[in-house]
């Protein structure tokens, strides 16, 4: 394990770690630690393939524009829609198709809004699982057919005034697996809005890091440091979930603390990246915002590098 100084000198992004509140709950954390270059091994377990539906549970208050930034991002991963000019978010997601099982398509499913925070504003992991289970209860439809449960991801998103165990201390998000009603496992994830709690950790590089080199932050592509930071972590959670949903997919290291598709490529957003510097990305000449991916409705996003199994390298869009 790196020392605390190394953690923040690394570039303040995310890698995978794990906690095990119970045998039925196996979340992988997105922690704030530097990792060496790695090669991910396939452990012959089940993966999520084909058409994958993401159901959302909004916990706390999100403005309409904040919700739209995130739902537009999820829609932008769908290669079946008319693609924007490259580099596109869809082309970033297509790297997951190079993993065993072939192409994977993300579809936005149902949404639940829990603006009044029914479980309070301080959550434990067991409560995240409970919330994810509510989102899992939806029947998702694709091409007129009910999508089988194994191809659904329940994603819990918490607002900036909601605290979650370990949030900002050692993780920015989580993905894991649990059982519902003694049935089969299902995949879930959680990502929090760090805007008022730890933007220098979980919304880097849109906010100056709390520790390490005081490099100038990049301008968030959608003008919302917290939500644009959430997009980075949602991207990491989704890529890790589809390629290692049940601890038998692609990762390196122990299953209890794996490096996964995105978390194996810590802090890399463009070419020439090094600890504390995200790499060369695109900058809009008029607005000054930084991005490396274009999405639907003219949206722009900054997406992390993903490990490419065909080249065994961390692939960036620019």
Image (cartoon, rainbow, N blue to C red):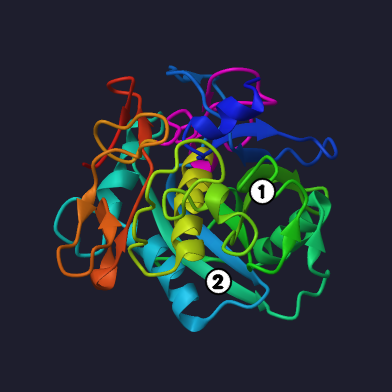
With 63 as the anchor, is 112 left or right in this view? right
Looking at the image, is mark 1 or mark 2 nearer the viewer?
A: 1
Could you say which quadrant of the image residue 49 lies in? top left
Q: Residue at x 55, y 40 (%)?
A: 211
Q: Residues within 10 Å of mark 2 (few under 14, many from 20)?
A: some
Closest to the observer, 267 or 84:
267
Question: Does residue 184 appear in this view?
Answer: no
Closest to the observer, 86 or 168:
168
Q: Is residue 114 above or below residue 230?
A: below
Q: Residue at x 23, y 41 (%)?
A: 280
Residue that label 1 marks: 168
Magenta span of residues: 241-267
Q: Position of residue 282 (x, y in %)?
A: 20, 51
Residue that label 2 marks: 110
Q: Position of residue 239 (x, y in %)?
A: 46, 42
With 206 as the anchor, is 55 left or right in this view? right
């Amino acid at each position: 394990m790196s020392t605390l100084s190394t953690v923040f000198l690394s570039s303040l992004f995310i890698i995978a770690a794990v906690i095990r509140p119970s045998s039925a709950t196996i979340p992988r954390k997105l922690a704030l630690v530097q990792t060496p270059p790695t090669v991910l091994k396939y452990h012959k377990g089940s993966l999520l393939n084909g058409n994958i539906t993401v159901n959302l549970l909004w916990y706390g208050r999100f403005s309409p524009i904040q919700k739209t930034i995130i739902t537009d991002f999820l829609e932008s991963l769908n290669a079946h829609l008319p693609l924007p000019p490259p580099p596109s978010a869809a082309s970033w997601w297509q790297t997951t198709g190079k993993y065993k099982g072939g192409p994977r398509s993300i579809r936005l499913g149902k949404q639940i809004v829990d603006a009044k925070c029914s479980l309070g504003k301080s959550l434990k992991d067991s409560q995240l699982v409970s919330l994810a289970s509510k989102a899992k209860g939806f029947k998702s439809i694709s091409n007129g057919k009910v999508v089988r449960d194994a191809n659904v991801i329940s994603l819990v998103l918490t607002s900036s005034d909601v605290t979650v165990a370990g949030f900002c201390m050692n993780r920015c998000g989580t993905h894991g697996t649990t059982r519902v009603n003694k049935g089969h496992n299902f995949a879930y994830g959680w990502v929090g809005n760090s805007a008022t709690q730890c933007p220098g950790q979980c919304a880097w590089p849109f906010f100056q890091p709390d520790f390490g080199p005081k490099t100038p932050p990049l301008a968030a592509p959608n003008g919302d440091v917290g939500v644009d930071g959430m997009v980075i972590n949602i991207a990491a959670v989704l890529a890790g979930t589809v390629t290692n949903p049940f601890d038998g997919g692609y990762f390196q290291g122990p299953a209890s603390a794996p490096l996964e598709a995105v978390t194996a490529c810590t802090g890399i957003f463009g070419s020439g990246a090094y600890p504390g510097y995200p790499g060369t990305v695109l900058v809009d000449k008029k607005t000054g915002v930084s991005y490396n991916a274009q999405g639907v409705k003219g949206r722009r996003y900054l997406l992390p590098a993903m490990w490419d199994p065909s080249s065994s390298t961390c692939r960036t869009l620019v």
